[in-house]
Image (cartoon, helix red, strand yellow):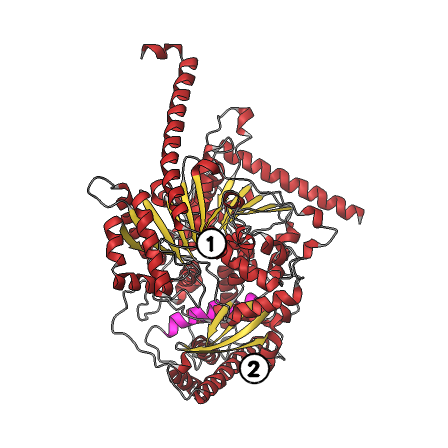
Amino acid sequence: MEQRKKRKLKLKKIRSMKVSEERAEIKANPYRKKRKAGCDETVRLMKQAKMDIENFDKNGTTGAKSEDDLTVDDLSLALDDYNSDEDQGVSDAGEEEEDHLTRIFLCSRTHSQLSQFVKELQKSPFGNNVHDDVDQSDFRITMASLGSRNNLCINDSVRKLKSVTLMNERCLEMQKNSKPKSKKEVDQDKPKRPKKVTKSTCCYYTNHDGVAQLTDTIVGKIHDIEEVIKEGKSLEACPYYASRHAVTLSQLVVLPYQTLLHKATRQASGIKLKNSVVIIDEAHNLVEALNSMHSCLVTAKQLGKAHGQLSRYAKKFNSRLKARNLFYVKQLLYVLNNMMVLLKGMSLESGKSQKDSKENRQKSSQLLTVNDFLFKSKIDNINFFKLLRYCERSKISRKLSGFVEKFETDGVVPIITKKESSMSTFLKDIKNPVVPSAPSPKPSENVSMSSPLMHIESLFAALSSANQDGRVVMTHDDSGPAVKYLLLNPASHFQQILEDCRALIVAGGTMQPSSCLIDQLLAKTESEKHRSRIVEFSCGHVIDGKRQLLPLALSSGPSGVEFEFTFQKRSNFKLIDETGRLLLNISNIIPGGVVCFFPSYDYERFVVQRWQDAGILSRLEMKKKIFREPKKANEVDKLLTEYTRCVNNVGPGKQNGGLLLSVVGGKMSEGINFSDDLGRCVVMVGLPYPNSQSPELREKMNYLDRNMKCHTDGRTAGQVHYENLCMKAVNQSIGRAIRHRNDYASIILLDKRYSRPSVANKLPKWISNHLSSHEKFGTAFASIKQVNQLIIIHIFNDSITNIFFSFSTIKRRNPEFDRC
């Protein structure tokens, strides 16, 4: 044992020295050439398949064509031999010998947030501004930025695809076509045959020297994703794979949520967290991100499509499928068929019980445990662990995708059996598909993948999880029946990150309330042994809260109508009109932009319609130009540009800025900076509690009640979670306003419930410490008017002081400054 430990330590030291030497060599010569990258896994599978074909040729059986008339290219889509599903030692035996140097992994929600971090890093002493002295060059760190193909791909034929899934499939297919033909295969193609269409390849991926040079460029200097793309275009090399190659040579890796938190994506990107430091930014939505990543929705149409494609694939390559492959293909068909039968039964029951009424059939659902769903669909005898291992190693979803693109998009009519015909009739009964004569120009249209089997594999992975960690929801609405897996315990997926990394830092600007993170993600580390390892730290804002911030909890409006936006009362016209009168009053005294947040899109639309009928909307438009948040993401930039132009174009005889009507949890509530005049006031209408009748939310609350302890005040863990969801949404929305130390704003919370200590304590401390409650509108209006005047004076005085301080510093350092 001791000798083995010594040998491991020695190997680790040698690997560390090799990586350090390579880093030093890259810093000394960033444009050195590197050896060609190894073959992709897909290319290896093709090579193996063609070796089988050559062995098949030696037996003398290729002279007579088979009944399926399979060509060499067709057989490249056939499954490789799968001998044993117990062979677990082959998986990552070679990869385990790679280095495990200490790295820092920084992940955030969006690429724009990562880009902001990289720009600040470039300005720091650890960035590119370090002098080239020998002593200081050691401070420069090596960094790699990871992203999806949607962000890093520079191939126009791939980028034009609207779906990330389609982009991944297209990229892998072009890699497959990049393998050059051998001399024997060229000789076989010499006889006159009908000319085939040349398969497309990726010139950026096949440029191995360019990819190696781009990898060295990424490591040699800190680059943003946009800069990596620019370098990739100039070198005609793939930025996506160059960034992945740069990870092993980097000390810092920045990456989005999905790449780090999803195990399959993490493994595919070659990320190993052992002995590393993990920093998760924007961690306020970490629980929701994990839940959404590991939850999945599969429709009956996708199940039927996959079943039909796999049936035709098995029929086409029936002579090539060995016993083990045939066994698992039949298992997949069996599982898909039984799920479709179960959804068909649910569809018929729903139609009978609700008399096929379109209004009554709007939506119905059943919530089951994982075991109950397996028993009900009669697939409880299937070992999903072995089935998933087979899908992973055989790459059957990729093979099926290539089969569909080759045989079912070129006018080849598929053969449909009686069983498939009955299933397709069932799918047509659900909703008759309409084939448009021309493609729809709507940008929000969902683009379906060529084969949905890869997506269905995520459902198989969910069904192999523990019974208590999730629930299966069977829904039936206008789009047809579907089965959805709902994750209840995100700690089961987060635990591996906790065990592998050396240290974990979760950070965010508005982390309040933070109890949900500890309760739901770090519950297993809350034992007495590890309690001391959890450290909480919070600090104030960079602004002076007394002078630059005015948070108000307002209980009534200008006419004395009480503000209480509960679900039962918020449709009252008097309450809605009072909200409009309040916005009219503050629009007179607050210059620039005012951002008003509503609980939902439906309520915002209802309020605007009422204001229009009551004549309040036209009066508001005389004060400020009104902008409404769009539902489509591609319209947000245009609206923000117009809103910014309106706010900055303030003058005599013009409107006094703009009024932006936004939605909590929408496009404007997170990731948008309403700094300076864009957000001089933020108005929060009511408390945006989620729908308590949602079956998913109720099941989540029941799960927390069963597994978490009650709080000291008597509230259950489910009730606390329900309140936390609301307050986290509020904190994110009102935090859009103040974005730097010279900024100032007023925050008006319209609801008398904000005056309660239980609600106010869940606001960020930099807001709750200065929160004042007002029962009457008059005192609040006077405070807003007075503070806005004083703030402008203070900011002006601070600016003048800073200017004189700067001039005195320049004068002290440069005596000749007096001559100017």
Q: To which quarter of the image does residue 393 belong?
A: bottom right
Label 2 secondary element:
loop
Q: To which quarter of the image does residue 267 belong?
A: bottom right
Q: To which quarter of the image does residue 156 belong?
A: bottom left
Question: How many neighbours does mark 1 have within 10 angstroms: few (below 14), some (14-19), or many (20 or more)?
Answer: many
Judge whether residue 761 is colored magenta: no
Q: Which callout, 1 or 2, points at the residue further toward the start of the chain?
A: 2
Residue 58 placement (x, y as % from top left): 51, 71
Q: Dot 2 corresponds to which residue?
A: 377
Residue 477 placement (x, y as % from top left): 42, 77
Judge whether residue 393 is colored magenta: yes
Query: Hey, what amino acid is under mark 2?
Result: Ser
Query: Hey, what amino acid is under mark 1?
Result: Val
Circle 1/circle 2 CB separation < 8 Å: no
Q: Is residue 129 in view from this perspective?
A: yes
Question: How many neighbours does mark 2 have within 10 angstroms: few (below 14), some (14-19), or many (20 or more)?
Answer: some
Q: Dot 1 corresponds to which residue?
A: 730
- Magenta region, main secondary structure: helix
Nearer to us in this view, 386 or 632: 632
| Left or right of 675, for residue 512 | right
Q: Nearer the viewer, mark 1 or mark 2?
A: 1
For the image, the number of numbered tags is 2
Which quadrant does the C terminus fall into?
top left
Q: Is residue 53 in view from this perspective?
A: no
User: Residue at the left extreme?
Assistant: 653
Q: Which residues are magenta?
A: 391-408
